[in-house]
Image (cartoon, rainbow, N blue to C red):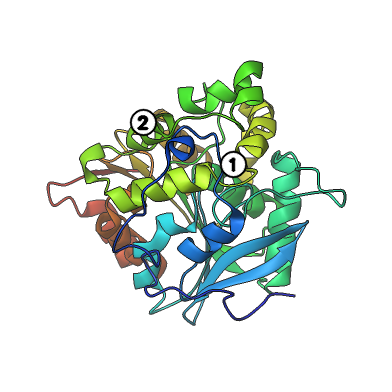
Amino acid sequence: MASREPRSSVSSSTRPSNSAALPPRSLAARLGITSVPRDELRRRYTQSGSRFVRIMGADVHYVDEGSGDTIVMIHGFASSLHTWNRVADELKHTHRVIRLDLPPFGVTGPLRSSTGVIETMNLPTYRRFIDTFLQALGVSRAVFIGNSLGGLIAWDYAVRHRDAVGRLVLIDSAGFPMKLPIYIDLFNHALVRASSPRWLPEIIIKSAVRNVYGDPRKLDAITLRRYVDFFHGEGTRAAIGKMVPTLDFEELDTDVLTTLAVPTLVLWGAKDRWIPTAHAAEFARRIPGAKSVMYPGLGHIPMEEAPERVLADLRAFLGGNASDSEELLLREGGSRRASV
């Protein structure tokens, strides 16, 4: 059963409790020789709406705020529910907004078997996980918004539970065959998988995070530190080493997207260096009636990099009427282009 109260408190819904000053990291921590304990991640990064539910051997961290129609937000690889902070803070005034830390990331960390062995997070495992999570929270129907890996989980859920998804938003979503980004593909090498749990310098993680922004200058020190802390979280690197070799998009049945009968919005950063921008058009082409918006200058996580731009399109799409949808497509303002 889901716990309705947070296990730790945070001063702000959008900032970690220690946002006023980042504690220094030792040399061993910066080199990734040590890991950040789960209790420390929980203390530092839970929010005022944080809750936990026990699923598949892990205390899954999620935030459940607001009231009204339900929105479920699913983040991408090596990210966390915090990537939705500013978008969720606005949408929770009109909707019930649920966002979670997917395993093995964020405060949640790895799933473990009954014997304590870290589970391999392949697509079948994510399917079991997300189904169990939503059942535990009593969510029978929702709008699903997913970014990157979270986009794949979202559209796959829509295919498997056709009456449970009212609307679908895919933001720089995974799904089509592609070459893995270099920072992920590193874990396909046996030496990296073996060494990374005991040694992975934070400079590599910081470089990867800068790479997902269209303009890395928009990254603040607190956000960058959050990504480093989570990647260096206890058990996370070992779990990633087991997970990455299973990321084979060649085997996914994307033809099934043509059978989806759900209003869909595809949002994409034109400077996405992780997933080709051509995939945005492919999602829009395959999903009947899908609308697509391309954001010049933004990267792989536009909802974190420029939440106000994404919010404008989400509000129009969630409004649900034809005039709002047409406005979404016609509004240019010199800041982006839209296509269908």
Residue located beneath label 2 in the image = 207
- Identify residue type, mark 2: Ser
* Kind of residue sitting beneath label 1: Thr
Residue 32: image x %, image y %?
A: 51, 35
Q: Which mark is residue 96?
A: none
- Identify which residue, 330 or 60, lies in the foreground: 60
For residue 76, say whether it is visible.
Answer: no
- Whether residue 221 is situated above or below residue 18 in the rendered picture: above
Question: Residue placed at 67% from the left, 73% from the top?
Answer: 137
Q: Nearer the viewer, residue 213 or 70?
A: 213
Label 1 SS: helix
Q: Residue at x 51, y 30 (%)?
A: 200
Residue 212: name its quadrant: top left
**Residue 100 higher or lower than 152, as above or below:** below
The residue lying at 47 percent from left, 62 percent from top is 45
- Circle 2 sits in a helix, a strand or a loop, which is it? helix
